[in-house]
């Protein structure tokens, strides 16, 4: 889900996910991935520094 441009969601990976997770679980995991990717893009776009790294520099 995070490297779709490169991997194109291969059928074998999709089949393995279907074997392990219900449709509801697959949707929940997909939404979680979207959320995390969104947070990461915001943080990178605003050059955010992790608070722990910020404290260590002070």
Image: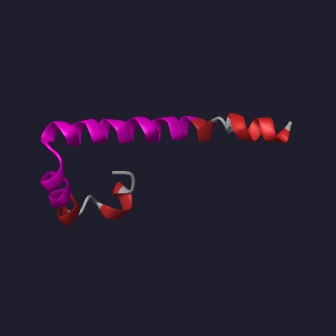
In percent of width and height, residue 6 lies at 37, 63
> As drawn, is 49 to the left or to the right of 28?
right
Foreground residue among 40 and 20: 20
Picture residue at 17% right of the left edge, 47% below the top: 21
> As drawn, is 10 to the left or to the right of 23?
right
> As drawn, is 58 to the left or to the right of 18?
right
Secondary structure that dominates the magenta span? helix
Displayed quadrant of residue 27: top left
Instruction: Judge whether residue 37 is colored magenta.
Output: yes
- Relative to 4, say whether 56 is above or below: above
- Relative to 43, say whether 19 is above or below: below
Task: Report the colour scheme.
Answer: secondary structure
* Screen quadrant of the C terminus: top right
In percent of width and height, residue 29 lies at 29, 41
Displayed quadrant of residue 48: top right
In percent of width and height, residue 4 lies at 34, 55
What is the span of residues highlighted in magenta in the rendered image?
14-42
Picture residue at 53% right of the left edge, 40% below the top: 41
Instruction: Judge whether residue 30 is colored magenta.
Output: yes
Picture residue at 55% right of the left edge, 35% below the top: 42
In percent of width and height, residue 25 lies at 21, 39
Picture residue at 33% right of the left edge, 51% below the top: 1
- What count of labels does the image hold? 0
């Amino acid at each position: 889900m995070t490297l779709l441009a490169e991997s194109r969601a291969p059928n074998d990976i999709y089949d393995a996910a279907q074997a392990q997770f219900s449709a509801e679980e697959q949707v929940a995991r997909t939404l979680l991935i979207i959320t995390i990717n969104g947070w990461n893009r915001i943080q990178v776009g605003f050059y955010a520094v992790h608070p722990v790294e910020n404290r260590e520099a002070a």
